[in-house]
Amino acid sequence: MNTPEISIIIPVYNSEEIIEELNNLLFRTLSNQISFEIIFVNDCSTDGSWQKITAISETYDDITGINLFKNSGQDNAILAGIRISKGNYCVVMDDDLQHLPTDILKLYNECKKGFDVCYANFITRKQNVIKQIGSNINGKIAEILVSKPKGIYLSPFKIIAKKTINEIIKFAGPYPYIDGIILTITNNITQIESEHQNRMSGKSNYTLSKSVDVFIKLFTGFSVIPLRIATYTGFLATLTGLCLSFKYLYDYFITKDFIEGWTTVVVLIIFFGGLILITLGIIGEYIGRIYLTLNNKPQYSISEIVRSKTNA
């Protein structure tokens, strides 16, 4: 096949009832408008999602389906799709029809103005409170750790230019975070306003643990700032302890004004003990990820790939 202008990457997890409608809507919207391919990445769904993807690939042109051996996480699944994409631009979108296919051309036209990435900034987010809070917190952390431009919403619905894609696929660590990788590559980023739809059916797969997972990826995967924070906090705690020591010695020998008992000792032990454990935890997270990277922990493992005849 000729090189498509855009590749649409869709990570899929337990969306058997939605995939066909999403695929149909994409074809109705984009056919005769722009050349495209669709890449569905099944992240080891427990329903019939893979069977649906296989059936779609037999009916429609320019479809590729990737089936992963085990659940690897959304960013890993996206990376699997990006690596086999052929388009000059890559669109990343969710599988739940909350992202409007009609906005793909808006993202494309804006990105073509010379930007490396264009995000969809949802006017109103149709998502649960936990997800909104998690997104806001991780957005603020991204501003500090990876210099995210202020005002940019790191939406899961975005388009990425080929030259940026070529840099993204070089990432070899076992814990990819696509937005984090993008922000370490470029700040030439923009966004457009987009409507966020209600999920077509079923319930969101987003949980508090996934928000924490994104937080940890950002915190330990793209910056040594957390280690520096631990170092500075250690110095501050040491200085605080030293000042308190002088105060207690002064009270004991000079003013004779001190309280008998172990309260102060216990409080200090709890404070500094907790501080030490937190610091060791941060260091341990870094060391654990280094260990897994050195042992070539795979980002994902592909069980099967199906393609339309025109996409073979």
Image (tube, helix red, strand yellow):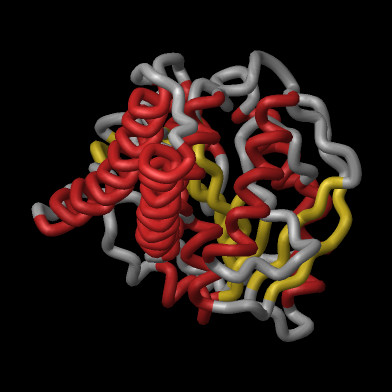
223 or 253: nearer the viewer: 253
The image quarter in which residue 151 lies: bottom right
Q: Is residue 4 toward the left or the right of residue 252 in the image?
A: right
The image quarter in which residue 263 lies: top left
Residue positioned 28% across, 30% down in the render: 70
Q: Position of residue 282 (x, y in %)?
A: 32, 47
Q: Position of residue 39 (x, y in %)?
A: 50, 49
Q: Is residue 145 toward the left or the right of residue 113 in the image?
A: left
Residue positioned 80% across, 73% down in the render: 110
Q: Position of residue 21 (x, y in %)?
A: 69, 29
Outermost bottom residue:
114
Q: Is residue 308 visible?
A: no
Please tell me whether residue 166 is drawn above or below residue 20 in the rendered image. below
Q: Is residue 82 toward the left or the right of residue 287 in the image?
A: right
50 or 224: nearer the viewer: 224
Residue positioned 42% across, 62% down in the render: 232
Q: Position of residue 16 (x, y in %)?
A: 55, 20
Please tell me whether residue 156 is drawn above or below residue 189 in the rendered image. above
The image quarter in which residue 116 lies: bottom right
Residue positioned 70% across, 37% down in the render: 24
Q: Is residue 260 visible?
A: yes
